[in-house]
Amino acid sequence: MFRAIADVLRQIGSAIATVVTLPFRALARLFGGASNTARRA
């Protein structure tokens, strides 16, 4: 019983972590691409 609850909580935590990190990852990719293009120009 406790193991099932722990598994559910772990899955919820990982889903929240991915949702939270996605926008930061997108921002990092945007700024990284912008700096790379600025360096090339």
Image (cartoon, grey):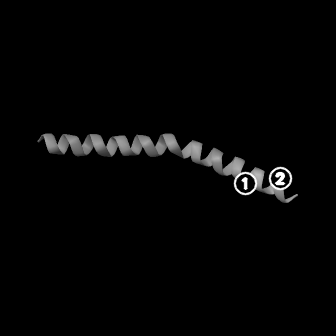
Q: How many numbered discs?
A: 2
Q: Which residue is mark 1?
A: 33
Q: Position of residue 30 (x, y in %)?
A: 69, 49
- Residue extending farthest to the left is 1
**Identity of the amino acid at label 1?**
Gly
**Residue at (71% x, 47% y) in the render:** 31
Q: What percent of the width, then of the height, locates residue 11?
A: 31, 46
Q: Residues within 10 Å of mark 1 (few under 14, many from 20)?
A: few
| Residue at (58% x, 43% y) in the render | 23
Label 2 or label 1, whichever comes before in sequence order:
1
- Around disc 2, counting alpha carbons within 10 Å, would you say few (fewer than 14), some (14 to 19), or many (20 or more)? few
Image coordinates for residue 36, horizontal then vertical, percent? 76, 56
Q: Is 4 displayed left or right of 14 in the figure?
A: left
Q: The residue under label 2 is which amino acid type?
A: Ala
Quarter of the picture holding the C terminus: bottom right
The residue depicted at 40 percent of the width and 45 percent of the height is 15
Residue at which label 2 appears: 38
- Determine whether, in the image, residue 11 is placed left or right of residue 26: left
Q: Secondary structure at mark 2?
A: helix
Q: Residue at x 48, y 43 (%)?
A: 19
Q: Residue furthest bottom?
A: 40
User: Of helix, strand and loop, which one carries label 1?
Assistant: helix
Mark 2–mark 1 Cα distance, whole angstroms, equals 9 Å
Q: Quadrant of residue 4?
A: top left
In which quadrant will I find the N terminus? top left
Seen in the picture, residue 2 relative to 36 is either above or below; the reply is above
